[in-house]
Amino acid sequence: MTVRKNQAKLTPEEKRAFTNALLELKRTGVYDRFVSAHNSFLMADSDFGNRVAHRGPSFLPWHRRFLLDFEAELQKVNPKVSLPYWDWTADRAPDSSLWAADFLGGTRRARDGQVLDGPFAYPAGKWPITAGVDARQYLRRGLGAGGVQLPTKAEVNAVLAMAEYDAAPWNSAANGFRNHLEGWRGANIHNRVHVWVGGHMASAASPNDPVFWMHHAFVDMLWAEWQARHPKSAYLPAGRTPQVIDLHSPMRPWNNVTPADMLDHRKFYTFDTEGAAAPAKP
């Protein structure tokens, strides 16, 4: 069983294995297929219908499956690799170990945000940006330069306390856990992290930055924690709803995967915070 670990607790060997697997997927073109897929789905999703990956109830199950597919590709390169998660309520500074040159790199050029160190820096020659609308080929970040702060534990706990998964009108105006976690209402949780990292993470082609996977692995972990806190709260909507992915509607691009298939993460992996014998929470 795959165990997803806090990136702050990875050994140097685990960090190298993860970054080397990312570089190999980039070399073979597999990585950029995921970037292009996310870019196209974010651009297509809107509050006027066609919501699959964003701005709707399926935001969480869609990204859970998206991460599973990507993790499977990493494990084709190295079976020991799993997606780490970035707990941005704890590792909140641009000088956190996450951004060190031996992991994701973080030093950026002031005039354009170009990442200058680490394995994904453009001068290293192994991470050209080819997917998305920006013609510049170098990875860009801001790391707090826009003036926003990363979400706090208190803000996250307030969202985790919300008992209803989602609510009509099932979009960015909805007053439920999903929308508050996604960041269109309230404390702007998930969206604010994208803005804090800046650069490519603040675009539809956000997976160009490898931190995308670690950010969403933590968002996924928060969903699992919410499920454990509210075992009687179900995915909504449960029944057929126009222009919304209900519990049993297929999600593009898979078409044979529904939110119901994604409710129990323990069918696929566990987190390092979970006991081995703990029961799954649907």
Image: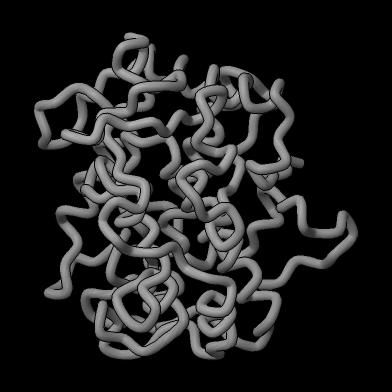
How far across and how far down the image is residue 104, in percent?
48, 30
To which quarter of the image does residue 181 belong?
bottom left
How far across and how far down the image is residue 30, in percent?
37, 23
Q: Residue at x 28, y 70 (%)?
A: 55
Residue 71 in the figure: left or right of residue 80: left
How is this picture coloured?
one colour
Q: Residue at x 31, y 34 (%)?
A: 208
Looking at the image, is 263 positioned above or below residue 17? below
To which quarter of the image does residue 137 belong?
top left
Q: Is residue 255 visible?
A: yes
Q: Nearer the viewer, residue 15 or 112?
A: 112
Residue 282 in the figure: left or right of residue 237: right
Residue 231 in the figure: left or right of residue 207: right
To which quarter of the image does residue 234 belong?
bottom right
How far across and how far down the image is residue 225, in percent?
65, 70
Quadrant that contains the N terminus: top right
Q: Residue at x 58, y 66 (%)?
A: 222
Q: Residue at x 17, y 74 (%)?
A: 47
Q: Is residue 238 visible?
A: no
How far across and how far down the image is residue 185, in percent?
32, 81
Looking at the image, is 21 positioned above or below residue 271? above
Looking at the image, is 143 positioned above or below residue 51? above
Quadrant that contains the C terminus: bottom right
Q: Nearer the viewer, residue 187 or 24?
A: 187
Q: Nearer the viewer, residue 78 or 204?
A: 204
